[in-house]
Image (tube, rainbow, N blue to C red):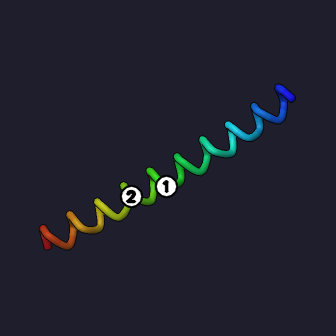
Amino acid sequence: MLQFDFLASKRIGNMALDAINKSKAMAVLQLWDFAG
């Protein structure tokens, strides 16, 4: 049970990191667009 919780939380953490990275990339692209 503990291992399942660990894997689930790791997967959720990876999904959260992926979402953060995507939003960062979008923000950078918007800044470039704004600056350009």
Left or right, 9 with respect to 21, comes to right
Circle 2 is placed at which residue position?
A: 23
Task: Identify the amino acid type marked 1.
Answer: Ala
Task: State the residue at coordinates (77%, 33%).
Answer: 5
- In the rendered image of this protein, does residue 34 appear above or below residue 16? below
Marker disc for residue 4: none
The 10 Å Cα crowd at callout 1, few under 14, some 14 to 19, many 20 or more, is few
Q: Marks 1 and 2: CB-CB under 8 Å? A: yes
Q: Residue furthest right?
A: 1
Q: Amino acid at mark 2?
A: Ser
Query: Which SS class for mark 1?
Result: helix
4 left or right of 30? Answer: right
Measure the alpha-carbon separation of dots 1 and 2. Answer: 6 Å
Q: How many marks?
A: 2
Label disc, if present, on residue 19 of the rendered structure: 1
Give the residue displayed 49% in from the left and 55% down from the top.
19
The front one of 13 and 33 is: 13
Name the residue located 21 percent from the left edge and 67 percent from the top edge: 32
Q: For numbered disc 2, what is the local secondary structure? A: helix
**What crowding class fits label 2: few (fewer than 14 Cα within 10 Å), some (14-19), or many (20 or more)?**
few
Q: Position of residue 1 (x, y in %)?
A: 87, 29
Indicate the position of residue 15 as horizontal and vertical percent values: 59, 51
**In the rendered view of the protein, which quadrant contains the C terminus?**
bottom left
Q: Is residue 33 above or below residue 18?
A: below
Quarter-wise, where is residue 25 in the image? bottom left
Residue lying at 36% horizontally and 55% vertically, measured from the top left: 24
Task: Farthest residue to the front: give it.
Answer: 1
Classify residue 34 by image quadrant: bottom left
Q: Is residue 16 above or below residue 33?
A: above
Q: Is residue 26 left or right of residue 10?
A: left
Give coordinates of residue 30: x percent, y percent: 24, 68
